[in-house]
Amino acid sequence: MKTVFAIPLALALGALICVPAAMKAQANSDCLTCHSDASMQDAAGHSISVDGHKFGDSIHGVLQCTNCHGDIKGYPHPDKIAPVDCSKCHVDEEKGLRGSVHSDGADHPCTSCHGNAHEIYPKTDPKSAVYPLNVPKTCSQCHGDEGMAKKHGLASVYPMYIDSIHGFALSKEGLLVAANCQSCHGSHHILSKKDPASPTNKANVPATCGKCHAGIADDYSHGIHGKAVAAGKMDAPVCSDCHTAHAILQPTESEFRSQSTPICGSCHKEKFSTYRDTFHSQLGSLGGYVETARCWDCHGAHDVLPASDPRSPVNPANLVKTCGRCHTGANASFVKYQPHANARNRKLNPALYFIRLFMNLLLAGTLTFFVIHTVLWLIRARYDQIKRKAAEGGKNA
Amino acid sequence: MPDLEKHEVMPAVGGNPHAGERFIQRFTRSQRYMHAVLFSTFLGLAATGLPLRFSQSYWARKFASGVGGFGAILFFHKFCAIILTITFLIHVKDIVQRGIVHREKGIFWGSTSMVANWKDVKDLFGHLRWMIGLGPKPQFERYAYWEKFDYWAVFWGMIVIGFSGYAMWFAPFFAHFLPGWALNAVLVIHSEEGLLAILFIFSIHFVNTHLRPDSFPMDMVIFTGVESEEEFKHKRALEYERLVGAGKLETRLGEKPATWQVNFSKVIGFTAISIGLILLVLTLTAYFGE
C-alpha cells in the first residue's frame, strides 16, 4: 500500500526538485554519454554503467540522475560520490525498515530486494523483483542459502516453501493470490516471530493465515484450540503447529496424513499411546493405506470440540454418523468400540486388561514350558545319538 | 482322508523289498496337501500379520512400503485367511464324516486318535524324566503327546485367531451380537494369539519335529508321506509293535519316494523353515525392541 502512495509522491517531489535544478545541472543524456558504456567501472571495480533504455522504462525513468545523485552539480564530478539515500522520497518504507529484522542498511540495502537501482519496476510489473511471483526467488537469495542461514541461526526456508502447497500454487500454477513470503511476513517492517507485533508471532498466526483462509479461521476460532489461544493459552496449537510454516503439505495427501498424528500426539501423549495400540494406527503407520482414521478424521480438524459438546463428531450422539463415514453399517453397538482403550489400565478397561493378561500368561506359560522341554530333549537326544554312533564305531555326528 | 490302516495302501511296488529297506505310510496324500496349504498360508499370514503387530518397527515399514503399502499386505492377509479357513472347514467336515457319520473307530479315542488320553500324560512325565536321566525312554503310538499338542494348538489357534480376525474384518456385522468392548478385545486376542502361534511354530514345532537330532535337518515324512521301517520302529515303537502283532504292517507299506520327490520336498521344506526362522528373528527383535 505504501508504495502506491509513494510513487505519485516521488513523482511530485521529483518534479518540484528537478524542474528548477535541470536548468543548472546535467540532463540524463549528458550522464549517459559516459555511463552508457557497459564496461564502465569505478576505482573499486564496481560497475557504474547504466542502461538508459531500461532506466527510462523503470519506475524512476521520469527522474533526473541528479535527483538521486544530488551531490553531482556539474561535470567533471568528483570520483567519490555520496551513496544514494532512497529514504529522501520513500519515507514510509524507511520508517518500516527501522526496527525490522532488515534494519541494518549496510547488510540490507534497498537494492538487495528491489534489484538494480536503475532498473526498478513497480511491484505489479512482472519484471519487478518484488512482483508476487518473484518474491520467493528474491528472498531466496539469502533465505535459501544454507551458509547464510547457518550464520544467522535461521532455517533455509526457501526449499521448504517452494515444495509446499503455497510454493506449488505460485511456481506451478502462477497464482497471484498464492501466499508468498511477504503475504505472511510483510515487506519492509518484517519482525521476528518472537516479537508480539509480528504477523508470524504465534498469537497472530491464526489472523495472518485467516487473511486468505477466512472460513477455516472462523472454524478455528470456535474450536477448543482457537478459544485457548484467544485466551492466551499458548500451549494450544495454531495453524503452523500442525501445518508447519513453510513446508505446508496438502492435508489429504498421504505424506501429511502419515506425519500428522505424532503432531497431535506431541501434546496428547496418553491418547497417542492408546491410539497406537489400535488397528487404526497399525494400518496407518505402514503407509500406503492412508484412509485409516487419524486424529482429526474423528475429532475434526480446525473446530475441535470436547466430546461433551453436542456439536462434536465424537459426542456419543454423533458417533454412529462419524464412524459410519468409513465403517458402512456402523450401529449403536459398533460405536461402543473404544478407539483409545488402554489394555494396560485395569481401572479404565477391566475386561480388556484381563483378556490381555490371560493372553500374555498363555503365551509366556506355553513358551516357557516348551522351551525348557525342547532344550532338555535336544541335549538328551544328542547325547544318546553320540553314544549310539560311538557304539557303532562311527564319528560323533 | 482315508484311514491308513483300513485303506488298501498301494503295495510296495517300487519299494524293492529285496533291498531290505521298506517304507511305511504315515500320512495320506490329502493330509500332506493339507499340511502344505496350512504352512503356506500360515507363512503368508505371519509375514503380513507381523508388520501390523509391530507397525512401529523399521523393518515393518520398509517391508510394507516394499510390497505396495498396507493395502497390499491387508489383501494378502485376508486372502490367506480365506484359504486357511476353507482348509480348516474341510478338515472338520472330514472328522465329522469319519467319526460321526461313518462311525469309524480310532478317530475320537484309542491309540490312533488325536484326542489326548491318560497315556499321553504319563508319556509327558516319563519323557521329561528320561530327558534328565531319571527313567527309561517312553515308547510312542502313532501320535506322541507333543504332536497332539501341536495339532490342538493349531486347532484352537485357528478358531480363536479366525474368529477374532473375522470379527475385525466384519466389525459392524459382528457388533450386532457382540458387546462394544469385545471389538477392542478381538485385536488383543488376535495379535497375542497370533504371536504365540508364530513363536511356537517357528521355534518349538520346528525343533521338535524337524531340527532335533532324530529328524535333523528335516522330517521328510510330512512331504513324502512315508518313512523308513527303521525310523518308524525307532520313533513309534508301540505303533510298530501293534501293527506287527496284528499282522497289519503289510497294509501300511508304501512306496520308496522318488529322488525328485525328496529333492522337491527339501526345497519346499527348507524354504518354509528359512522364512519361518527369519520371521522369528524379526519378531524377537521387534518384541524386545518395543
Image (spheres, rainbow, N blue to C red):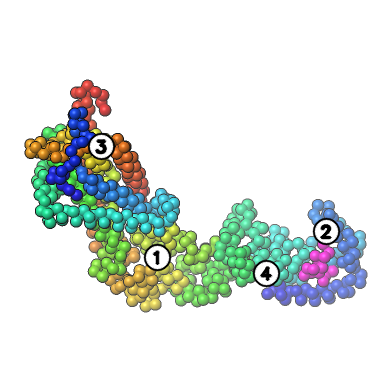
Q: Which residue is labeled 3 in the image?
A: B257
* In the depicted structure, whether residue A380 falls above or below residue A176: above
Q: Which residue is labeled 1 in the image?
A: A293
Q: Amino acid at mark 1?
A: Ala
Of discs 1 and 3, which sits in the foreground?
A: 3
Q: Which residue is labeled 2 in the image?
A: A49
Magenta residues, as a range?
Answer: A48-64
Which residue is at the far bottom? A310
Q: Amino acid at mark 4?
A: Gly
Co-location on one chain, circles 1 and 2:
yes
Question: Which residue is at 35% across, 68% downward?
Answer: A327
Figure quadrant of residue A196: bottom right
Q: Secondary structure at mark 3?
A: loop
Residue A108 is marked as: none
**Chain to which mark 4 belongs:** A
**Chain to which mark 3 belongs:** B
Nearer to me, A221 or B84: B84
* In the depicted structure, whether residue A2 falls above or below residue B278: below
Q: CA distance from mark 1 to mark 4?
A: 47 Å
Question: Which residue is at 78% across, 73% downward?
Answer: A10
Count every numbered label the image shows and give the total.
4
